[in-house]
Amino acid sequence: MRFDVFALGQSQGRVAFLPFTKVNRKACAERALPPPVTIGEHIRAKRRERRLRQSDVGNQIGVGAETIANWEKEKAVPQIGFMPAIVRFLGYDPTPEPTTLTDRCGRTGNGSACRSKKRRCEPALTNHLGEVGNRPD
């Protein structure tokens, strides 16, 4: 007994199908994604919204497609020199506004930045407390 094995796509003109089978095709339901938090998530969301490829975005920003993929996967963070191009691509600044007094002062972990830059901290401190001249020492 001889069995012939046919692979799909050969030039013999045979196609595997199931006769009298009804096929219903449905598009996948769009799931709601959480709002983007990181710069890579912002880039991915805007790229998908505009239906662009990573290489297209890379050409607009001035980097390669691999770099865009690394940013989107959070394997790398964009250098500060690329931020103006990223802001132009997104149409907005993806970095959050400082909300706490420490963020406004630009304070580092050791606490020395606020003491050394008092002029920079005073407007933020007065805006935060709503009073002028009441500074904790």
Image (cartoon, grey):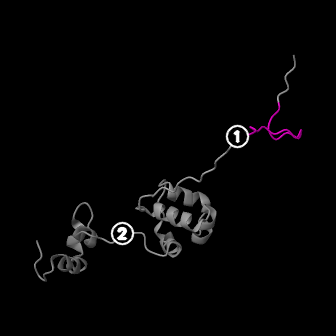
Q: Quadrant of residue 102?
A: bottom left
The disc label shown at residue 96, or none:
2
The disc label shown at residue 21, or none:
1
Numbered disc in front, either 1 or 2: 1
Q: As rendered, which of 123 and 24 lies closer to the eye?
A: 24
Q: State the residue at coordinates (10%, 78%).
A: 134
Q: As rendered, which of 30 and 80 lies closer to the eye?
A: 30
What secondary structure predominates along the stretch shown in magenta? loop
Where disc 1 sits, the SS reads: loop
Residue 90 higher or lower than 18, as above or below = below
- x and y, in percent, of residue 74 in the image: 47, 55
Q: Amino acid at mark 1?
A: Thr
Callout 2 crowding tier (Cα within 10 Å): few <14, some 14–19, many ≥20: few
Examine the structure image and report whether residue 94 is included in the region drawn in magenta.
no
Quadrant, the N terminus = top right
Q: As rendered, which of 78 and 87 lies closer to the eye?
A: 87
Inter-mark Cα distance, 1 to 2: 54 Å
Q: As rendered, which of 22 and 12 lies closer to the eye?
A: 22
Outermost residue on the top side: it is 1
Q: Earlier in the sequence, mark 1 or mark 2?
A: 1
- x and y, in percent, of residue 55 in the image: 63, 63
Quadrant, the C terminus = bottom left
Outermost residue on the bottom side: it is 132
Q: Which residues are magenta?
A: 6-20
